[in-house]
Image (cartoon, helix red, strand yellow):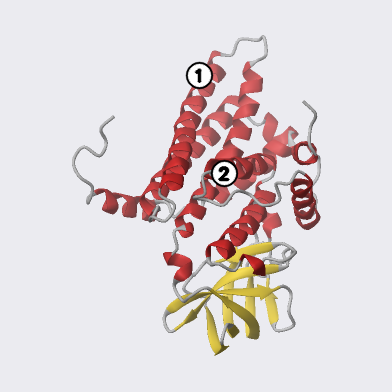
Amino acid sequence: MESTPFDQLLHRLATRSRPLELEPLLRELLQALQREHHDLLPLPGHGRTLDRWRALARVAGCDLSLAKLYEGHTDALAILAECGVAHHAGEGIWGVWAAEPPDARTRIVARDGDRVRLQGRKAWCSGALQIDRALLTAWQDDQPQLVAIERPHPSQRIQADHWQAFGMAATTSLTIVFDDSPGQAIGEPGEYLSRPGFWQGGAGIAACWYGAAEALADYLREHCRTPRPDPHADAHLGAVDAALFGARAALRECAAWIDRHPSQDASFEVRRTRAQVEQAVELVIQHVGRALGATPFCRSSHFARLSTDLPVYLRQSHAERDLAELGRQLTGMPAGAWQL
């Protein structure tokens, strides 16, 4: 089968020997998909959610920093469509900035219809140096309002002193300071969190985790193909397969549930799936590293990048906080909820 421009780009990403700039890579990725008439991924909850996640996983298996920006761009387009303003998408690369740490909050200080002015700080702005537009959460009357902004703008100031990352370093998730900065309100106040797509999009991140873990597991599988017997590596490979099998089944079941219930709250199903995938990915990292030793960390740039980036990306999970909320939700379920 002849490879497509998308396939060729992913192969080049996985085999490159040195870091490349993300912005031209992302634009090339979007152009390659457009040439194949796949520039817009299927929207979640429209019957092809798993196809959407498969595309995210493929990109993640090549480069997690690129996948982070690609996932943000596709998530922004899905949000705009869900809010009924897909026509605002236009050209260029989008991001979604919705982190709300206590020491960084953006406020709406003036409003004229859907035109707003922003003041304050927004942290964890992934792709701040690469993207053209962003959807961010800003606060008005104690409710988060989704706002679209253009990047860059003279009223926006970047704070880069806190960004000391090695893993996921290329995403440049910086802090931006707004000083009477213009923006456009998208949807109604509180709609960003209340819409069904909020949790549906959260599962797409788990698909990225899975894609990177799958790529790491392939290194172990190739190692076990060699004629020289290595029963310990075989045992590690068996453990990896079992972990990935469970994560893959969880993602498929979650995607099917979302497609059957596109307008329902998917928080329980997504939290459960993310927990399953997170645990599986942590097992894969452990078993692959123990089986292969230091060699691929030092001699394969692709393996080394994934191994450095994946633990950082995985921490987009809220860990025990998510598990605690999952447990709280479980207490309200009827007896027999775990029956086969």
Label 1 belongs to which residue?
235
Give amino acid for label 1.
Ala
Q: Position of residue 229 (x, y in %)?
A: 61, 10
Label 2 belongs to which residue?
53
Can residue 245 be seen in the rendering of this structure? Answer: yes
Query: Could you say which quadrant of the image residue 227 lies in?
Result: top right
Residue nearest the viewer, comparing 165 with 98: 98
Residues packed near mark 2 inside 10 Å, few (<14), some (14 to 19) or many (20 plus): many
Residue nearest the viewer, comparing 154 with 237: 154
Look at the image and tell me in which quarter the N terminus lies: top right
- Residue at the spot x=66%, y=21% of the render? 222
- Residue at the spot x=29%, y=29% of the render? 340
Front label number (2 vs 1): 2
Can residue 274 be seen in the rendering of this structure? Answer: no
Q: Secondary structure at mark 2?
A: helix
Q: Position of residue 221 (x, y in %)?
A: 61, 22
